[in-house]
Image (cartoon, rainbow, N blue to C red):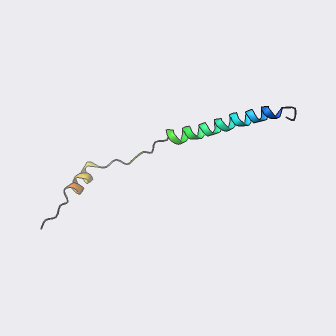
Amino acid sequence: MPQMSPINWLTLFIIFSLTFIMFNMMNYYIYTPILPKINSMNFKNKLSMNWKW
């Protein structure tokens, strides 16, 4: 709207920009990847692998 003063445009831009940045940061830091679980059988096999001279 052309009737709005420039300072009002600036405050709206800052508010929306901060909201956008905060939303992206929250989505980035809330995400927790699911790590694959190690089977106990595979883990024992890897531990018991020793050299027999």
Q: Nearer the viewer, residue 37 or 53?
A: 53
Q: Nearer the viewer, residue 47 or 2?
A: 2
Residue drawn at the location 64% of the way across and 38% of the way down: 20
Tell me which corner region of the image, top left, top right, bottom left or bottom right, holds residue 9.
Answer: top right
Q: Position of residue 10 (x, y in %)?
A: 76, 35
Q: Position of residue 7 (x, y in %)?
A: 79, 33
For this orientation, the residue located farthest to the left is 53
Tell me which corner region of the image, top left, top right, bottom left or bottom right, holds residue 23.
Answer: top right
Look at the image and tell me in which quarter the N terminus lies.
top right
Look at the image and tell me in which quarter the C terminus lies.
bottom left
Residue drawn at the location 59% of the way across and 41% of the way down: 24
Q: Position of residue 51 (x, y in %)?
A: 16, 64
* Left or right of 52 in this view: 37: right
* Left or right of 18 in this view: 42: left
* Left or right of 24 in this view: 10: right
Residue drawn at the location 82% of the way across and 35% of the way down: 6
Tell me which corner region of the image, top left, top right, bottom left or bottom right, holds residue 50.
Answer: bottom left
